[in-house]
């Protein structure tokens, strides 16, 4: 059960909010009609969510926002406002308000925003607590996450790192397989020795043997001097074989001998060399399927797959997105000499609602591009959009929303679908006309007054569409 504070100088509004929240939820509501008493109340107790009117005598909603955030930064603040003061409400969201809602509002709308705020606030608290716990453990500096999937991954790394067992890391592209390999090395007894990565998919077949095992002068055209191979470089350390599924059949045989006997031959030499290496391999492909089709040796697979560590996709651990975003923001602030202090709530909600087919790597690149484009001290959705990241919802988001609709009673589903259509249609027609309401009304065949009404009902402000138009 979450605690909510509703602050409004109108007693009728407080009574309405009390009735709506008590009827539809189990959250504990406190009401306050005098904003001057807020400081004293916040000294006595804390709240998960604060609902505050924007225009009040003595203290404005913006002042309430600042006071709440100063005392409790993770409390979600929702601004209630009349249509004529939407610009001030938007200013409040830029200053850290979770969202705003216009009066008069539908009870379904305010309950939805409250639940979103509570979920977001709880997620922040959980991430802070879990991050503190993680920092108490042996450091894995570049691996970020607090979900159960990541906790399991960290436990595997700690158990396996101290051994010399061969490890096969599997997972989709962009999930951080090399980071796990480096973590295994850094937590092992070999950490003072070399970590040597080799990408089997990028080295041409004609030279990969030479890259791995080295060659002697004159062993082939172009071998003008002796060359030390990566296997020798990695002696007593860790050799990381990335994209192992792309290794050609001839090299698979030679790698198998290296794994079985710890022996290899330098290209152009008959001498047998011994080595002591910890092997870690990685792939985003289905090796059992490649074995079935003859593309990968079964005996080599079993040699590599002594310990299997599977990396979860970002879709499986979306709760980690806020932590990852904060980590990448700090990283690219340092890299590009920026001082962006926060990620806006609007951007974070967008990030949480997206699919990430490129996983953590795609998210990292999005934050990097946004940091480069950002001009203020807050990373905004417009910065990410300006960097080339589309604003449309992800396919899974659209499917989830459709599934939710079809689980509602008919009338509720119909009303929700009409509301969604109104919002989407009006947004697009305003965007095409750069926020010019008269032009938008003519194009859509609607009366200007009716268009204004639809805009009010869907909290759409024509000014925001002017800002997004590069010609304005």
Image (cartoon, helix red, strand yellow):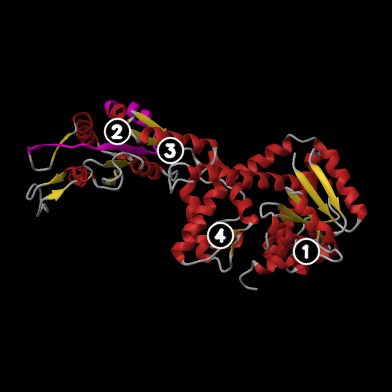
Which of disc 4 and disc 3 is earlier in sequence? 3
**Residue shown at 14% from the left, 50% from the top:** 227
The residues bearing labels 3 and 1 have C-alpha atoms spaced at a distance of: 46 Å
Q: Which residue was labeled with disc 3?
A: 171
Name the residue that disc number 1 marks: 86
Do residues under tags 3 and 4 come within 8 Å of each other at their CB atoms?
A: no
In the image, residue 409 lies at what x, y percent?
Answer: 80, 35
Q: Would you say 400 lies left or right of 10 here? A: left
- Residue holding disc 2: 164
Image quadrant of residue 99? Answer: bottom right
Q: Dot 3 lies on which element?
A: loop
- x then y, percent, for residue 90: 72, 63
Q: Name the residue under label 4.
A: 384
Name the element at disc 1: helix
Can I make out residue 440 in this image?
A: no
The magenta span reads 270-299
The answer to whether mark 1 and mark 2 are in CB contact below 8 A is: no
Quadrant in the rendering for residue 84: bottom right
Q: Which of marks 4 and 1 is nearer the N terminus?
A: 1
Residue 216 image offset from top left, x and y in percent: 9, 47
Name the residue rendered at 70%, 65% in the picture.
464
State how far apart marks 3 and 4 are (Cα). 27 Å
């Amino acid at each position: 059960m979450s605690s909510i504070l509703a602050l409004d100088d109108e007693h009728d509004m407080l009574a309405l909010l009390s009735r709506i929240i008590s009827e539809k939820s189990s959250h504990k509501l406190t009401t306050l009609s005098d904003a001057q008493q807020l400081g004293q109340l916040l000294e006595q107790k804390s709240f998960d969510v604060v609902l505050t009117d924007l225009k009040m005598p003595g203290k404005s909603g913006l002042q309430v926002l600042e006071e709440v955030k100063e005392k409790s930064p993770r409390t979600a603040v929702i601004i209630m406002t009349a249509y004529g003061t939407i610009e001030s409400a938007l200013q409040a969201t830029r200053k850290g308000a979770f969202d705003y809602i216009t009066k008069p509002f539908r009870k379904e709308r305010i309950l939805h925003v409250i639940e979103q705020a509570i979920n977001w606030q709880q997620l922040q608290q959980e991430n802070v607590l879990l991050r503190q716990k993680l920092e108490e453990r042996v450091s894995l500096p570049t691996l970020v996450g607090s979900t159960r999937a990541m906790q399991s991954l960290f436990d595997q790394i700690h158990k396996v790192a101290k051994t010399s067992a061969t490890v096969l890391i599997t997972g989709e592209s962009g999930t951080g397989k090399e980071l796990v390999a480096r973590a295994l090395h850094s937590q092992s007894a070999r950490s003072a020795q070399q970590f040597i990565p080799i990408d089997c998919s990028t080295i041409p077949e004609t030279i990969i043997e030479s890259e791995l095992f080295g060659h002697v002068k004159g062993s082939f055209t172009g071998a003008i001097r002796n060359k030390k191979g990566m296997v020798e470089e990695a002696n007593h350390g860790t050799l990381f074989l990335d994209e192992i599924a792309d290794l050609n059949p001839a090299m698979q045989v030679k790698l198998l001998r290296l794994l079985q006997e710890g022996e290899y031959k330098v290209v152009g030499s008959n001498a047998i060399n011994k080595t002591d290496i910890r092997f870690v391999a990685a792939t985003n492909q289905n090796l059992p399927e490649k074995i079935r089709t003859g593309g990968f040796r079964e005996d080599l697979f079993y040699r590599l797959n002594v310990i299997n560590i599977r990396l979860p996709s970002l879709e499986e651990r979306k709760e980690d997105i806020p932590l990852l975003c904060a980590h990448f923001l700090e990283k690219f602030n340092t890299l590009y000499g920026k001082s962006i202090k926060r990620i806006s709530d609007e951007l974070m909600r967008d990030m949480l609602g997206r699919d990430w087919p490129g996983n953590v790597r795609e998210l990292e690149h999005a934050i990097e591009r946004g940091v480069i484009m950002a001009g203020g001290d807050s990373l905004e959705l417009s910065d990410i959009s300006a960097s080339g990241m589309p604003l449309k919802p992800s396919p899974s988001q659209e499917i989830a929303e459709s599934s939710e609709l079809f689980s509602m009673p008919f009338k509720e589903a119909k009303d929700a679908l009409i509301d969604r259509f109104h919002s989407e249609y009006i947004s697009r027609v305003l965007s095409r006309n750069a926020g010019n309401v008269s032009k938008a009304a003519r194009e859509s065949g609607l009366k200007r007054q009716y268009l204004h009404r639809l805009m009010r009902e869907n909290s759409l402000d024509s000014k925001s569409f002017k800002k997004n138009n590069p010609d304005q």
